[in-house]
């Protein structure tokens, strides 16, 4: 019997946040702590990304927070400086990962050995989820203009549709984390469909 091989672990800096980043999602951050300035410097110098994980315990600043085990890689694509001189970055979500081990440096920056998850399979949206496509179109029109030029084919991709709904619907962060951790795009759509009546009553 051949032993099943596991994907190799890679080491990445981790940035715990009180929010969930989804694959292809957009992230804007203001950087002021020295440990995170070092993180940005490392990523730009080597062309690498950093891992974003939801904070389970603790806070974004101060002592190292306890991050969720499942997160999303973030890749910086733009910088800016605000009126107060703080560094701002804009990043895009990449692949998801699972943290196998993590450690805190002396300055509090977390580093994790992570297993990168493969992309979800491309699955066509079944007809019973057509309502979700219409809802996403309305959400994008009012809340996410950067997605207005998304091709029609994207709305037919169950993974893309579910991830965009999970980031735009008013879910709490625990629910968003649950959606991130799902690996079946049709199950994600089914769970989102079952949640919808909660918002329609408002």
Image (cartoon, grey):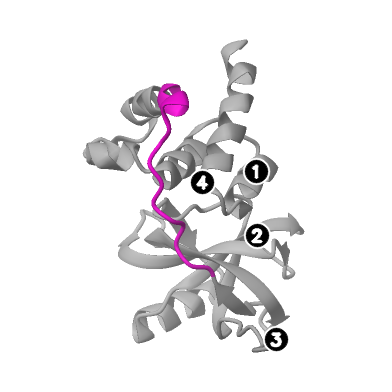
Q: How busy is the neighbourhood of tag 4: few (under 14 within 10 Å), some, or many (20 plus)?
A: many
Q: Which residue is mark 1?
A: 173
First-in-chain label (4 vs 2): 2
Q: Give the residue furthest to the right.
A: 57
Q: Residue at x 49, y 72 (%)?
A: 50
Q: Residues within 10 Å of mark 3 (few under 14, many from 20)?
A: few
Find out whether residue 129 is within the magenta segment.
yes
For the residues carrying marks 4 and 2, which lies nearer the camera in this image?
Answer: 4
- For the record, the magenta segment spans 117-131
The residue that mark 4 highlights is 185
Residue 130 in the image: above or below residue 41: above
On residue 106, which mark appears? Answer: 3
Above or below for 143 versus 54: above
Outermost residue, bottom side: 2
Label 2 close to label 1 by CB (< 8 Å): no
According to the picture, the residue beneath numbered tag 2 turns out to be 60
Secondary element type, mark 1: helix
Residue 18, percent from left and from top = 63, 51
Q: Residue at x 69, y 61 (%)?
A: 68
């Amino acid at each position: 019997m051949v032993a099943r091989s596991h994907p190799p672990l890679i080491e990445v800096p981790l940035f715990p946040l009180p929010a969930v980043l989804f694959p292809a999602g957009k992230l804007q951050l203001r950087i002021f702590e020295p440990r995170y300035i070092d993180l940005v410097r490392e990523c730009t110098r080597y062309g690498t990304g950093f891992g974003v994980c939801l904070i389970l315990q603790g806070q974004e600043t101060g002592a190292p927070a306890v991050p969720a085990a499942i997160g999303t890689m973030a890749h910086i694509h733009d910088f800016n400086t605000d009126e107060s001189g703080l560094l701002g970055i804009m990043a895009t979500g990449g692949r998801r990962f699972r943290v196998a081990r993590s450690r805190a440096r002396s300055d509090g920056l977390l580093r994790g050995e992570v297993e990168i998850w493969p992309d979800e399979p491309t699955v066509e949206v079944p007809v019973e989820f057509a309502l979700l496509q219409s809802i996403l179109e309305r959400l994008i029109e009012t809340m996410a203009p950067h997605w207005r030029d998304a091709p029609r084919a994207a709305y037919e991709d169950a993974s893309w549709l579910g991830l965009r709904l999970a980031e735009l619907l008013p879910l709490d962060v625990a629910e968003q984390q649950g959606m991130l951790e799902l690996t079946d795009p049709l199950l994600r759509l089914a769970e989102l469909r079952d949640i919808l009546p909660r918002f329609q009553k408002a």
